[in-house]
Amino acid sequence: MIKIDNLVKAFGPKRAVDGISFSVERGEVLGFLGPNGAGKSTTMRMITGFMPPTAGKITVGTFDVAESPIEAKRLIGYLPENAASYPDMTVASFLDFVAELRGLSGSARKKAVSHVIELCFLQSVLHQSIDTLSKGYKHRTCLAQALIHDPDVLIMDEPTDGLDPNQKYEVRKLIRELGANKAIIFSTHILEEVDAACTRAIIIDRGRIVANGTPEELRAMSDLAGAVTLQARGATKERLETLGRVEPVNGAFRIYPKEKSKGPQLAQEVVELVNQYGWTVEGMYSERGELDEVFRRITLPDTVKK
Amino acid sequence: MKTIWTITKRELYAYFTSPVAYVFLVIFLLLTGFFTFTAGNFFERGEASLAAFFGWHPWVYLVLVPAVGMRVWAEERRSGTIELLLTLPVAPWQAIVAKFLASWIFLAVALLLTFPAVITVNILGEPDNGIIFAGYLGSLFLAGAYLAITCMTSAVTRNQVVAFILSVVICLFFILAGFNPVTDLMTRWASPALVDTVAAFSVVTHFDGFQRGVIDIRDLVFFLSLIGFALFATGVIIRGHRAG
């Protein structure tokens, strides 16, 4: 549904997006991760046709965004960063306005508007003007706007930003549900959202893709992946070191496999060792790896100079 | 066409739901009333015409039209809604024309509300209503020209005050180029051809014809091309922001 080929965006001498290529098919939810200023919003603005790219090609559906922007935009629902909407309008008139611009009329428009009102829980604020709404409601109003024409492609810039935990949960659930028959891209810096909603994630840093894979694959890049944490009475560091590198963690031991690929066997080996010496096990887990560790390792913080 | 009308409707709705619009209408009517009847010596003229009324329009509009138009793009950029609007299936030129039309309709409503002046002059004497009609038409185009310039300056900045000041300065130039004290000053050192060329750029020169009851195609072309040019420039400026 979305195909991006060698996309570049330069602001003066700075290349905000520097040769990004990826594609998203129907049924995929792509999480777009990266530190602030990595080029996430810029990339999304180019896909939605708001900014022309400096170089590269974007195809949405069968349309080239640069050549037939209107047709491409028809396929896209977009939730911009900060969820901007017209503050002087009421929720109902705003949604009606967007539906009209989306080419919906008559009963189809009424149906579409009432559908998104239900989907985004907006019944109680329908006739309030948008500037009187709380941040969560404003956000949901803008989300409703993006969904009104039941788009094939949904692009959301930080859809859970500023929401409370309950609302975050609802939005993630909604993204997951919608993802079944749409192509979705959403950006976030909250790593747990990748697990909660994505089928695939891309990490970008300084305008380049530094990782691309399923949440599992990304997690496996972590040093921690495959390690076994053992909390057992009687266990000693020396004995465990026969299996691999050992690190004490809060009264427990974390054993790292000698080779990444040996991860699955390690747990078995630990169990054998436990049986051999008759330790009393209080807790034992295989680490799946932590996304934030991967994230920290492959992206550089803002404070580091180029 | 439908897209344009949808956006125009929304903009008009935004004008008429804000108290600023009504304040504007009152100030506009008070000012035109004051200039016509007090400063314009309407009664002392002893003639049944609205010359005193229309003569002040280039000056009244100088302040009031930028006040109406300054928010058109500046506000859209400040609040970030421009990103929403231009990612909907809307071509930038459609949005530009739609927003211009909405503000122009608003100004036309303000102008129509001056109808008591027409009634007054018809009660007091027997004016040539054709001249009055031409005057209104010219006044509408004059407002449109200022408005298009304001749309352009409004696209330059996200600060409404800056947009306001810029457009007042530009509109003032378009008045002064044909304003008698200025052209008199110029004739002292410039050739008559140059003076005429500069004066030809003035809105006052082209508005004069309408005030005399003459709807000259050249004056219409002047105003329409000024509007067209300013809106085209608006498009270039908006594209420029996004190109980065």
Image: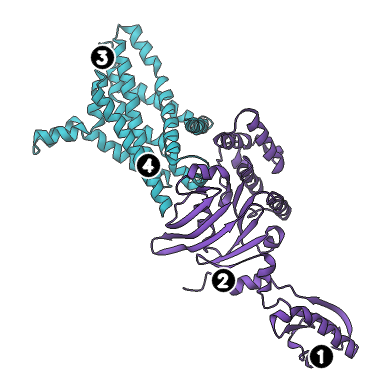
At label 4, which amino acid type do we have? Thr
Disc 2: host chain: A
- Locate residue A37 relative to residue A182 in the image: left or right: left
Closer to the camera, B30 or A270? A270
State which quadrant residue A270 falls in.
bottom right
Q: Which residue is mark 3?
A: B44
Q: Circle 2 sits in a helix, a strand or a loop, which is it?
A: loop
Which of pointers 1 and 3 indicates the residue nearer the eye? 1
Image marks 2 and 4: residues in contact by CB distance under 8 Å: no
- Across and down, in percent, residue B34 comes to 35, 23
Say the numbered circle drawn on residue B234.
4
Mark 2 → mark 3, Cα distance in angstroms:
80 Å
Horizontally, residue B22 falls left or right of residue B232, namely: right
Of all residues, the one furthest to the front in this rendering is A62
- The answer as to whether the residues below labels 2 and 3 share one chain is no
Separation of disc 1 and disc 3 at Cα? 111 Å
